[in-house]
Amino acid sequence: MATATSATEPTTGLADRFGRVATDLRVSLTDRCNLRCTYCMPPEGLPWLPGPSVLSDGEVGRLLRVAVELLGVTEIRFTGGEPLLRPGLVPIVAAAAALSPRPKLSLTTNGIGLERLAGPLVAAGLDRVNVSLDTLDPDRFAQLAHRRRLPDVLAGLRGAVAAGLAPVKLNAVLLRGINDGEAGDLLRYALAHGYQLRFIEQMPLDPQHGWDRAQMVTAAEILAMLEAEFALRPDPEHRGSAPAETWLVDGYADPAGRPAKVGVIGSVTRPFCGDCDRTRLTADGQVRNCLFARDESDLREAMRGGATDAELAERWRAAMRSKLPGHGIDDPTFLQPARPMSAIGG
C-alpha cells in the first residue's frame, strides 16, 4: 500500500505553459446515464466502462486528497454520465468535504433522483447543484432524451431548493428545429422559481460525430432570442474564469433580492480558453487537461501499481503542462475526442 505524502511538503499547482493554473476539478463518477439526450448519447446507449476499470470510492477519495492537499484544487464538481447513479456518491461527497482546506463542492446532474438524494447530499457537504433542463414540454423532452422523465427532473429541482441547495443553476442546450423556440419560456420558468439559467452552445462531443457547426444555435442567436422578450444589460460583475457571460434581466430579482441574471456559455463561438482553470478526472482514472483533449494521462494504473501520493501529483502536473492554448474547434485540423461527453464528464 502506498504511503501518503504529507500535505505540509512544498507543492506546485497544476500550471500549464501558458500561465494558467487549474484549481477547478471536474470528476466524472460514472459514464452511465438514465437518459439518452441526442447531443450526448445515441438512443440505444453506449457500451459502459467495465466495472474493474472504474475507480473505487476509496480511489476517488485518494485522488481528491492529492488534488486538494498537494495540487491546490479549491473547487470540485462531480459529474457523469449521471453522478446520482453512483452508489457511493454521498460518502464520496462527505470525504471531499472533510479535506483541508475544504474545497467548494458542486454537482452537475439531470435531476432524476435528486428529490430523494438532495437532503443526504447537503448533509454530506454539497454546496451547489446544476441541473440540465432543455425543455419544459413533456413530449419534446421525450424526443430529446428518449425517456419520459420530465416530472422527475422538475421534482428534483424542487427537492434541491427544499434541501437548501439554492441558488439552483439550470443548464440548457438549444437544438435547431427542436427546442430552439423555448429560450424565452425557459428563462421565464427560471425567473419564476429563482433558478439561475445558463444556455450552452452544443459542442462537438456526440458519440456519432455528427455535430455540424452550421446547425448549432450560437450564443449570438440565443441572445437575440432573449432580447426579443426581455430587457438585458451586461453584468458589471467581473467574469473571471467563469465560462458563462452573464446579463442582468431588468425587472426581475433572485430570491435574495439581487438583480436576476441569465448566462450564455459560448464554448464554440466565444471560447474562454485563455482563462480556463479546469482539470478533469474520468471515471476510469484518466486526467484530461481539456474537455476536447485527444490525449489522457493514466493515474489509475499508477495508483494501483503502488505510486505514492507525490508520484501521482507529479503525473498530474505533467499532464497539465502539455495543455494546448485553446480547444482548436475553428482549426481545419480539429478532430473530436474519441470519447463522448458522457464518458468525459461535463
Image (cartoon, helix red, strand yellow):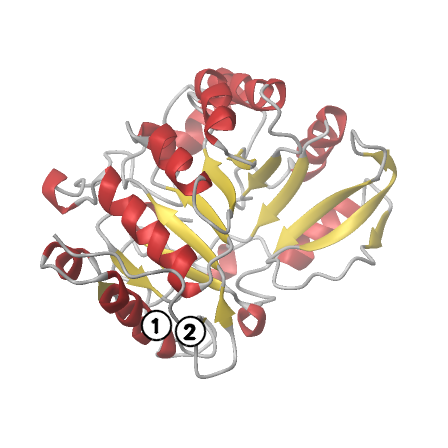
Q: Amino acid at mark 2?
A: Thr
Q: Which of the numbered marks, if any, corresponds to residue 317?
A: 1
Task: Identify the element where label 2 is drawn.
Answer: loop
Lower position in the chain sequence, tag 2 or tag 1: 2
Q: Nearer the viewer, mark 2 or mark 1?
A: 2
Is residue 254 toward the left or the right of residue 340 in the image?
right
Q: Which of the numbered marks, if any, corresponds to residue 12?
A: 2
Q: Residue 97 at x, y = what percent?
A: 46, 39
Is residue 213 toward the left or the right of residue 257 in the image?
left
Q: At x 68% / y 58%, what residue is drawn?
A: 220
* Front one among 170 and 73: 73
Q: Residue 12 at x, y = what percent?
A: 42, 73
Using the rendered view, name the quadrant where residue 172 is placed. top right
Q: Amino acid at mark 1?
A: Arg
Asked whether disc 2 touches disc 1, contact meaning CB atoms under 8 Å apart, the reply is yes
Q: Residue furthest bottom?
A: 17
Residue 282 seen by the camera: no
Q: At x 22% / y 60%, what residue is drawn?
A: 299
Is residue 58 toward the left or the right of residue 137 in the image?
left
**Distance from Cα at disc 2 to Cα at disc 1:** 8 Å
Using the rendered view, name the quadrant where residue 8 is placed. bottom left
Using the rendered view, name the quadrant where residue 89 is placed. top left
Residue 109 seen by the camera: yes
Q: At x 26% / y 61%, what residue is drawn?
A: 309
* Front one among 322 and 193: 322
Task: Identify the element where label 1 is drawn.
Answer: helix
Q: Residue 284 at x, y = what percent?
A: 21, 50
Q: Residue 252 at x, y = what percent?
A: 85, 35
